[in-house]
Amino acid sequence: MHRQAYDVGLQTGNSSIAGMHKTFAIAREFLAGVNLVSIKDEIECVSKSQEYHGYMSVAEMKLGVQHMAVKCLIDGDKESSGTKSEDGSLYDNNPTVAFYQMIISVYCGYFERVKHLAKRWEKITVTNSFKKILPFRLVYVHFYWGLASLVVARRKATKLSDIDRFISIVENAADFCMWNFRNKVALLKALRHSLRSQNTEAEVDLSLTSKFVHEEGLCHELAGMHYEELGEFQRALDSYRQAEKCYSTWGSQMKVNKTKDKILHVSRILRIL
């Protein structure tokens, strides 16, 4: 739909509308786990054409943020690059920037930062200028927020608050779009069961049923972390290897490298044992 709107916008000379619909299409590709290199190439192609068609600054800014996020996930570029305007106001208080930085932080493993960015996103979006928030983005924010809260709570043995609210929001979305959100609900519940030292097998299996390769990789990686903490190193190794395959398909060399480090660490432990 957005691609058709982009084409129509260009054909009718409405380049600003065309630019906005292109950013929407790219956002959905990003969240669906489309290969990052292909998304990067598409953004760079569109950015070149914008010099001719003259998109409005909003679309140009969003393309810049998306390009920054993709490059960071591909090769580990600094996630702050491309997020500052001359006076700082355009980006520091923009929910789009906070949203993409949140996703980057999830896959970099900066879960405390994910929580900080989620709170910042929520604070920004309650202002009058950002009342119209896309429902799917609201769901994703609470998914990442819940995921980060559970990981941090397990690491620091702290009390957990609001997790039921986060899961409820994602569950409500799954009622309307099961194929998109059922796996996310399952992953959150698996992490909650892990935190409570309960069996996680059913939820882990269900969380792996999605066709979103980046989220499958994340699930395998978190499962590996869970098994490693339990001392089940062979299962941890198997999970990390599956995660590496998923991240390779996704096109994230940064995640492949990080996962290889975990594989090497667990392999050394197994050799010692």
Image: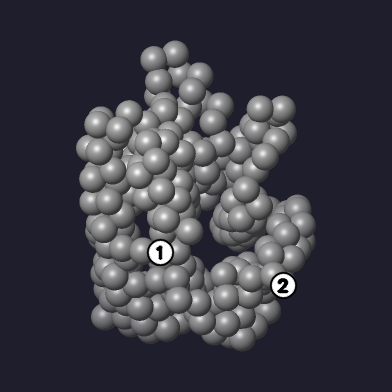
Image coordinates of residue 35 in percent, x first then y, are 31, 63
Q: Residue at x 34, y 72 (%)?
A: 246
User: Farthest front residue?
Assistant: 12
Image coordinates of residue 85 in percent, x first then y, are 40, 20
Q: Looking at this view, is 117 or 34 the one in front?
A: 34
On the image, numbered disc 1 is attached to which residue?
A: 33
Q: Residue at x 46, y 30 (%)?
A: 58
Question: Circle 2: is it few (<14), some (14-19), or many (20+) Cα within 10 Å?
Answer: few
Q: Is residue 137 above or below residue 49?
A: below
**Colour convention:** one colour
Q: Looking at this view, is 87 or 199 the one in front?
A: 87
Secondary structure at numbered mark 2? helix
Image coordinates of residue 164 in percent, x first then y, are 77, 61
Q: Looking at this view, is 162 or 6 the one in front?
A: 6
On the image, numbered disc 2 is attached to which residue?
A: 175
Amino acid at the residue labelled 1: Gly
Q: Is residue 145 visible?
A: no
Amino acid at the residue labelled 2: Asp
